Structure formats: C-alpha cells, structure tokens
Amino acid sequence: MNKAIAINPTGVKPRRTPLTREQIGGFWAVYSGWVLDGVDSVIYALVLIPALTELLPLSGIAATPGNLGMYGSILFALFLIGWGLSFIWGPLADRFGRVKTLAASILIYSVFTGAAAFAHNVWELAAFRLIAGIGVGGEWALAGTYVAESWPEDRRKMGAGYLQTGYYLGFFIAAWLNYTIGATYGWRAMFLCGLAPALLAIFTVLRVKEPGQWDKASKGVAAVVSASSSLKELFSPAFRRRTLTSATLVGVAVIGLWAGSVYEASAVVTLATRAGIDRIGAVHLASIGAAILSFATILGCLAAPWLAERVGRRGALGIYFAGMAVSIVFAFGWVFYQPDGLNLFMVSLLFLGFFGGNFAIFSLWLPEQYPTRIRATAFAFNASIGRFLGAGVNFLLAAAIQWQGSLGLPVAWTAAAFGVGLLILPFAVETRDQKLPE
C-alpha cells in the first residue's frame, strides 16, 4: 500500500511559526535564570584553590596539594548531592506551576551562594554549597520544561539548544568576574556576586506567565496528583524504560561535565604554577580557560538540535559521548603531565567544551518522553538521579586524587563512564519526528 506523499508545489520552505511577545519575554526571563545558574555553579570551581587554601587551615587541616584536591572533590560531591535533592522542584512545578517554582529555586541558589562569602571554615562552605545546589539543580528542569511547553512545535527543539547556551554563557561571565573581581578582591567577593539572581526571581514571578500547555492541563482532574503519585508513574510500565535509561545517561553526562569543566580551573592553575607563573597570572589564565571552554560549549549546544534532527537523539548523544571520552583522556591523561603542556591544555578545552554541549540534547529529549502532567517531575527526577551518580564518582575522585597526589589521571579515568553510556544508548527511546505529548 503506497503512502501519500506531501508535495509543496511552490518549492518554498514553509516559514516557522512566529513567536509571540509573551513567548519571547518568557524565554529571556528563564534564559537569564539559566545564565546566572551557570555563573553560580562555576564560581566555586574558579575559586576552589584560594578558598580552600584559606579555609582548610582554619578548619585544622593542612592545605597540602593532596588535601586541596581531596576536600575540593568532597565539596563538589556535596554540591552534586544538593543538585540531586532538587528533584523536589519537579512535583512542585507540576502541581503549582513552572514559573512560581522556578522563581523559588532561583532565590534559594542566589541567597546561599552569597552566604558562602561568609564561611569561617570548610564545613560552613560545604553546607552553603549543599543548599545552593538544591536551588541550582531546579533551574534546568524547570526552564527546559517551560520552553518545551511554551514555544510552538516547530521551534521548541532549537529553543532547547538556545536555552542550554545560557548555562555556558554563565561560565563566560563567571570567568570575567574572576579575571576582574576575583583576582583583585578575592574569592569571597566572587561568592557575593552570586546574590544577583535574587532580583531575577522577583521579576520572574511578577512578569512571566505560565506556559499554555501546563495552564490547560492544570484545569483538568489529572493535574491534581501528589508528588508520590507522579514519581510512582515514572516507573509504570509505560515509562519505566525511558526513566531508567534517561537517568543513567544524564549521570554519564554529569560525570563528564564535572571532569571537563569543574576541574579546568584547578588544572590550569596547576600547569601555570608549574610553568613559573605567579598567582594573579595563574588566576587570569584559569579565567581565560573558562572563557574558552564556555565559548566552545555554546557552539556545541547550538549544533546539538541540528544534529539530533538528522541522526536522531541517540545518535547525536553517542557522537557527543565519544568525543567527550577522547577529549578527557587526551587533556587530563596526557597533556596535563607534559612539562610544557599549558598551551596545549588550553587548546584541548575547545574540544572538552564542544562535546560538553551534549546537555542541549537532554533539554529537547527529556520533555519529549513524558506527558504534561508529569513532565517537570520526570525531568527533575532524571536529572537528579544523574547528579547522585555524579556525586558518587566525585567521592571516588577525592580518594583517587589523594592517593595519586594529582588530579590528572583520576579525572581521565572518568572517560570510562562514557563507554557505559554508549552501551546504554541503544536501549533508550528515540523520539525524533514525534510531537511533544499532551
């Protein structure tokens, strides 16, 4: 039986659906939150060495290279645990709306990032970063869900790519802040910069409307469900496979994010110091490295929706995972140990950054796998489980760095996670050419 073939007699490519003023304004509001989320997330990575160099002795711990690496990894892990606990935002967003919940998450992470400036010891810093992580972790799921539901079908996929660039634009801004404010006024001033998003939270509540798809669904009986019911549905026969595969794949990506980006600053400072560059010069180079990384990742995010439409979600993610594995091994397993490896390491950040743009694929893929009534819950849950996996790896990294006395090889070992991801990808649900479920 022959299938009907749609013919465009004019040969002119159809115009995309125009965005309304409300859709544009809402996008820029959640995009700004995602930018500032990126700033807050990477601040700690940029100030890791100076902050712990001051706080470890105040906590009765010697600031040796091994201790700096070990306690740095422990604090990274605690931040990821906070990210993992952010799954609470998903059921809240499905019940009370995307916008109000998003504003609450922004307020939490900005207040507790600012509070880190007043830490008197490493344990206070750890507590502040844990709570900030709960707020930071909610932004991705809520912003991604908002764009998927508010933008028209023929634009939402590229909208996911645009949205994801915001997080890495935040890296660029944080690098600039560290180059100027951090180098001049120190690490505490950097954390104080994290208070800025609090103002955005107020604006978001007052000016941004809920996406039409959620607003329509919220008037139905199905919307009135408890958090436990929503989470239980994620493991029903209809969604169990996609939940298990998606959560694991996000975990693989998180491991790569923290290996490739969070340890960038520490690696550059180490290489710069080895090359005889002074403290301020090393901070400047770490900031330049973060800017290179963020620029390359933005390019990777913009390429992700285009690639996902041509080879499918699974194929595109496989390309990014393979590229990330090779880049991590090359940068941390080989270049890091070269006597004059600083310049080549800076070049390797271009590849670490580009393939780190794999998160843009999740931004368009995860919303496609679940209906509106549980979409935010599913996005937040899958992201959170992935972060718990990443936290576990960081605890292992802490021990490995302490054992090795260096962060190079332990970080390079994380490339193995991408091999696991490539084995899991064939079991994931492919959603190319499918509309967003109602």
Image: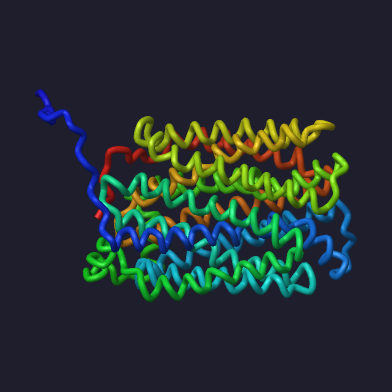
Is 253 on the left or on the right of 309, as rendered?
A: right
Q: Position of residue 336 (x, y in %)?
A: 77, 36
Task: Specify the quadrant that holds the C terminus.
Answer: bottom left
Is 259 on the left or on the right of 185, as rendered?
A: left
Mark yes or no: residue 148 visible. yes
Which residue is at a point 55% across and 38% down the rendered structure image? 354
Q: How is the image coloured?
A: rainbow
Task: Work out whether residue 384 or residue 359 is closer to the camera in this orientation and state it.
Answer: 359
Task: Tell me where residue 53 sits by quadrant.
Answer: bottom right
Task: Tell me where residue 412 sits by quadrant.
Answer: top right
Task: Tell me where residue 154 sits by quadrant.
Answer: top left
Mark yes or no: residue 142 visible. no
Which residue is at a point 55% across and 48% down the rendered structure image? 251
Task: Work out whether residue 228 or residue 183 is closer to the camera in this orientation and state it.
Answer: 183
Which residue is at a point 63% across and 36% down the rendered structure image? 416
Is 320 on the left or on the right of 146, as rendered?
A: right
Q: Residue furthest top?
A: 2
Q: Position of residue 178 (x, y in %)?
A: 69, 57
Q: Position of residue 162 (x, y in %)?
A: 42, 48
Task: Specify the quadrant that holds the N terminus.
Answer: top left
Task: Work out whether residue 141 or residue 234 is closer to the camera in this orientation and state it.
Answer: 141
Looking at the rendered structure, the number of numbered marks drawn on it comes to 0
Is 373 on the left or on the right of 349, as rendered?
A: left
Q: Is residue 361 above or below residue 141?
A: above
Which residue is at a point 75% across and 66% down the rendered structure image? 185
Q: Position of residue 224 (x, y in %)?
A: 29, 72
